[in-house]
Amino acid sequence: MLKRRTLNTLIGLCATGLAASAGAQTKWDLPGAYPASNFHTENLVQFAKDVDAATGGKLKIQIHDNASLFKAPEIKRAVQGGQAQAGEILLVNFQNEWPLWGLDGIPFLATSYAESQKLYQASKAALNKKLGEQGMMLLYSVAWPPQGIYSKKQLDSAADLKGVKWRAYSPATARIGELVGAQPVTIQQAELSQAMATGVVESFMTSGSTGYDTKTYEHLKFFADTQAWLPKNAVIANKKAFDALDKATQDGLLKAAAEAEKRGWATSEKKTGEYLDLLKKNGMTIYPPSAQLKADMQKVGETMLKEWLDKAGAEGKAVVDAYRK
């Protein structure tokens, strides 16, 4: 009798446990580095809503914007170590760790959305493999608008940048500064407005999006629309955290990620012109680069591609060859 009662109790507990497990809600933290008004962050917020809907509320993702949970360079390690289950990173920030992270930061290798998408597809397998080795996985990736040069005066050539305090946000942008004779200073986006206000930064390369978000027009009045490259953000997840989800929740997450990638690229391209118009409205002069400035910057790009290929070896060459086919 006692055995039967014990057995019935165990069966009851198991049934309760299974029911609780079936209805269990999982919460993920997803740190990002950009303000709530940035289109990447808006896309993250929509992604989290889509995941909630696609998983029937079983997976809730909390977005932490503007480097409020981790600073931009810390997010990848936080996801890798399981301090956050997912995160949004700027790939070029990690070039010193592995050359292919910096592929889309090489000036004039891919200068349009079509070329950037082609470069992404050529490198995707390598990115997934590396993330897998580090206990992570790629959920989706979205390009920033094309990069141009902000400065206090209009630039006629790269020589005009000699000795200028140059904001670098990645190894590639630091190297550009070195090659044009500027003085690179590493500043992440969250600190950029203050750096300009205090004179720590006098020029830099970034997108119209970042220029507008940081109110660059209050400090620097010129933007050379060089369309030099389109760096990508990647939203990554901790593989153990993903594997702990049931199959239906995993599928819902991946479906929402695919939609976020498609939406993000379309939004980025649409907003390119909008951001430049907003900069103009706020008193910034937008101008096409002179033939000399373009030639100077393309020379910088050629140097950097050669340096990158030397470091990236056969793996890097294979990706560039696939892209150029």
Image: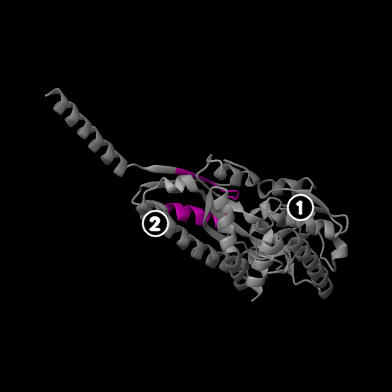
Q: Which residue position holds label 2?
A: 251
Q: In this view, does 122 lie to the left or right of 85?
A: right
Q: Which residue is drawn at 75% across and 72% down?
A: 288
Q: Which residue position holds label 1?
A: 167
Residue 205 figure quarter: bottom right
Residue 143, horizontal then vertical, whole percent: 60, 62
**Label 2 to label 1: alpha-carbon separation:** 41 Å
Sequence-wise, the earlier of marks 2 and 1 is 1
Q: In this view, does 169 lie to the left or right of 4?
A: right
2 vs 1, front mark: 2
Q: In the rendered structure, which segment of residues is drawn in magenta?
A: 28-50
Few, some or many residues within 10 Å of mark 1 (<14, 14–19, 20+): many
Q: How many labels does the image show?
A: 2
Q: Is residue 173 visible?
A: yes
Residue type highlighted by circle 2: Asp
Residue type highlighted by circle 1: Arg
Q: In which quarter of the image is the C terminus?
A: bottom right
Q: What element carries label 2?
A: helix
On residue 184, which mark appears? none
Few, some or many residues within 10 Å of mark 2 (<14, 14–19, 20+): some
Q: Residue at x 78, y 71 (%)?
A: 289
Q: Is residue 37 visible?
A: no
Residue 108, horizontal then vertical, whole percent: 72, 69
Give the answer, above or below, for where 216 lies relative to 65. Answer: below
Residue 195, horizontal then vertical, whole percent: 75, 47
Q: Which residue is drawn at 63% across and 47% down?
A: 72
In this view, the residue in front, 260 or 313, is 313
- Asked if residue 42 is among those painted magenta in the image, a careful observer would answer yes
